[in-house]
Image (cartoon, rainbow, N blue to C red):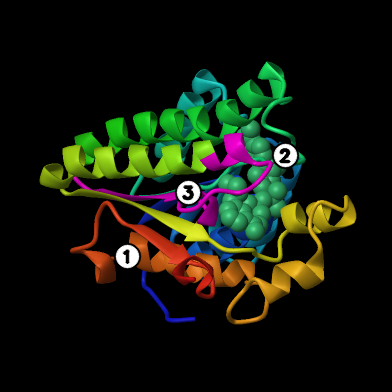
Amino acid sequence: MPTYDFTGRVAFVTGGSAGMGAATVRAFAEAGAAVAIVDLDGDTAQRHARQLNDAGHRALGIGCDVSDEQQLQNAVARTVQTFGGLDMAFNNAGIMLPPVDTAEESAEAFDTIVAVNLRGVWASMKHELAQMREQGSGAIVNCSSLGGLVGGSGRATYHATKHGVLGQTKSAALQYGPLGIRVNAVCPGTIDTPMVARMTAGGELDPEAALAAIPMGRLGRPEEIAAAVLWLASDAASYVTGVALPVDAGYTAQ
Ligand SMILES: NC(=O)c1ccc[n+]([C@@H]2O[C@H](COP(=O)([O-])OP(=O)(O)OC[C@H]3O[C@@H](n4cnc5c(N)ncnc54)[C@H](O)[C@@H]3O)[C@@H](O)[C@H]2O)c1
């Protein structure tokens, strides 16, 4: 993993208790940033924050449902109060429901996915950008998916939200570029996280077929997404904004 020096900077990671969010929290902390771990699972967020603080890092665990704008606004405010600003955000919290025939999906399922994956990124960007606009600097990375670039049978709503995240990313990048704030997205391939473990256990993902569809022949590691997020959030990517960066072992190159 390349090293960055984020000493004195503040990072905000939604969905930071597990999977690629947790890996990104660790990477930000190890690079010297103070990190807010923002997650529906507030107990785990607080436990991880304690462990990081005990190891000499600076972390804050916040229980928060990203689909609730007020909770998100409070989480941003607590982060700024505690650490004095907000420089980098990884808007990563997202959910997937089991695949469904598009002719039979319930409106409740549609609303549930949209509330977290699309409204959550909307609320996150809204309150992060308000703070970053005051500071005149900042970098946001939104978590889309390979599902933001291609379709997926039985997953129309999930893929719609991930395509939508790219629309949010590009539009905010255009508006905030002149203010010194960059907004990008990562599009992970199939990554070895609790989400994928649940899909495999539930019979939604056939591991052999999944591996056969990945040109590099293996699942990604959460740390490989963290590495892309840190690069996009860092000054090394100072001329990069509005991109949808696939980190998918070549899946969307096929
Ligand atoms: N794992 C993959 O293969 C893969 C591929 C492409 C994109 N993604 C996307 O990456 C992101 C992270 O995925 P993961 O695999 O690490 O997931 P995960 O399920 O392993 O972890 C997600 C974390 O988000 C939290 N979360 C869920 N709903 C929330 C809410 N409403 N508010 C706040 N926190 C919430 C969970 O508690 C959990 O800690 C998601 O947006 C997912 O759609 C995952």
Q: Residue at x 53, y 47 (%)?
A: 92
Relative horizontal placement of residue 239, taking residue 242 as reference (left or right): left
Q: Choose the circle earlier in sequence order: 3 or 1.
A: 3
Q: Which mark is residue 160?
A: none
The front one of 20 and 33 is 20
| Label 2 vs label 3, nearer the camera | 3
Give the percent coordinates (x, y) of residue 211. Answer: 71, 74
Question: The residue under label 3 is which amino acid type?
Answer: Gly
Relative horizontal placement of residue 67, taking residue 163 as reference (left or right): right
Mark 1–mark 2 distance (CA, rounded to whole Å): 28 Å
Q: Is residue 158 magenta?
A: yes
Q: Choose the circle earlier in sequence order: 1 or 2.
A: 2
Q: Residue at x 69, y 26 (%)?
A: 103
**Within 10 Å of the Cα at label 2, are there few (<14), some (14-19), or many (20+) other Cα atoms?**
some
Relative horizontal placement of residue 203, taking residue 60 as reference (left or right): right
The residue that mark 1 highlights is 234
Give the percent coordinates (x, y) of residue 118. Answer: 50, 32
Question: Is the CB atom of the residue marked by disc 2 within 8 angstroms of ligand 1's nearest atom?
Answer: yes
Q: Which residues are magenta?
A: 136-159
Q: Which mark is residue 41?
A: 2
Give the percent coordinates (x, y) of residue 9. Answer: 36, 56
Question: Is the CB atom of the residue marked by disc 1 within 8 angstroms of ligand 1's nearest atom?
Answer: no
The residue that mark 3 highlights is 148
The front one of 4 and 254 is 254
Give the percent coordinates (x, y) of residue 187. Answer: 48, 57
Question: The residue under label 1 is which amino acid type?
Answer: Ser
Relative horizontal placement of residue 3, taking residue 177 as reference (left or right): right
| Label 3 vs label 1, nearer the camera | 3
Can residue 85 be seen here? The reply is: no
